Image: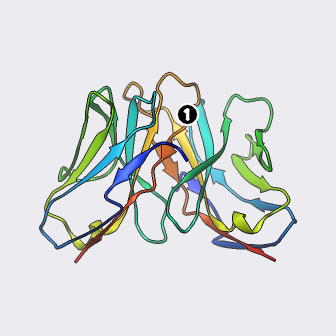
Amino acid sequence: ETGVTQSPTHLIKTRGQQVTLRCSSQSGHNTVSWYQQALGQGPQFIFQYYREEENGRGNFPPRFSGLQFPNYSSELNVNALELDDSALYLCASSSATEVQETQYFGPGTRLLVL
Amino acid sequence: AQKITQTQPGMFVQEKEAVTLDCTYDTSDPSYGLFWYKQPSSGEMIFLIYQGSYDQQNATEGRYSLNFQKARKSANLVISASQLGDSAMYFCAMRETYSGAGSYQLTFGKGTKLSVIP
């Protein structure tokens, strides 16, 4: 196990609602990245947080936003949910001081938007 | 153009045999890293092996080895002595240097589904 935890594990929402997903990073890691994985696809980068600041963003609209807290845990917020937001959301933690900066993933949150 | 290409949607291998999963990549960044992850049906992405662009030797981790051919831009994963528990999706991913300090997003391929036959 990586030590990265995510909550909740599963979530069902309706179109137009808002959702918050949570991630606790592995001990000693200061960077958190979020990915969206649609069914049958590889994960797509949403954004990354480093020292509580957004530090890179993929091709996702502003209704996808996030936070990182002083303990390096993180939240992903999605407003105005659309049907296409149904996916597995993966959080990964890493350390900026490690040469490889390997990202270690949590178990994911499965979001279904009806 | 796709940055990571995995051309094998599905592969079958007999238990105890070796299998090679293909990955080609495209980048103009001289400094990059290549990763392989395993994703069982539970969904969690499990890190397997890493190869840096400047590494002189192919990476190995237990039964996993990476056949890194830099000129061909390929980074194939070799799994030796396959086990039933190896049945999963396997993703190749690349990390390039991003413009922001400290940001290293991973770009993933579409994955290969490996099935190990008893």
Residue in view at x 36 percent, y 28 percent: B100
Residue in view at x 85 percent, y 60 percent: B81
Q: Position of residue A85 (x, y in %)?
A: 28, 66
Residue in view at x 48 percent, y 66 percent: A41
Residue in view at x 46 percent, y 25 percent: A96
Scheme by which the image is coloured: rainbow
Horizontal relation, residue A107 to residue B18: left or right: left
Q: Is residue A35 above or below residue B40?
A: above
Horizontal relation, residue A108 to residue B35: left or right: left
Q: Position of residue A72 (x, y in %)?
A: 33, 32
Q: Position of residue B49 (x, y in %)?
A: 67, 43
Q: Is residue A12 above or below residue B20?
A: below
- Mark 1 falls within which chain? B
SS assignment at label 1: loop
Q: Is residue B111 above or below residue A59?
A: below
Horizontal relation, residue B65 to residue A90: left or right: right
Quarter of the figure with residue B118 = bottom right
In terms of depth relative to the viewer, which is nearer, B91 or A21?
Answer: A21
Q: Which residue is mark 1?
A: B29
In terms of depth relative to the viewer, which is nearer, A110 or B58?
Answer: A110
Amino acid at pointer 1: Asp
Q: Position of residue B59 (x, y in %)?
A: 76, 38
Q: Quadrant of the C terminus of chain A?
A: bottom left
Could you classify mark 1 by the number of other residues whose Cα lies within 10 Å: few (under 14), some (14-19), or many (20 or more)?
few
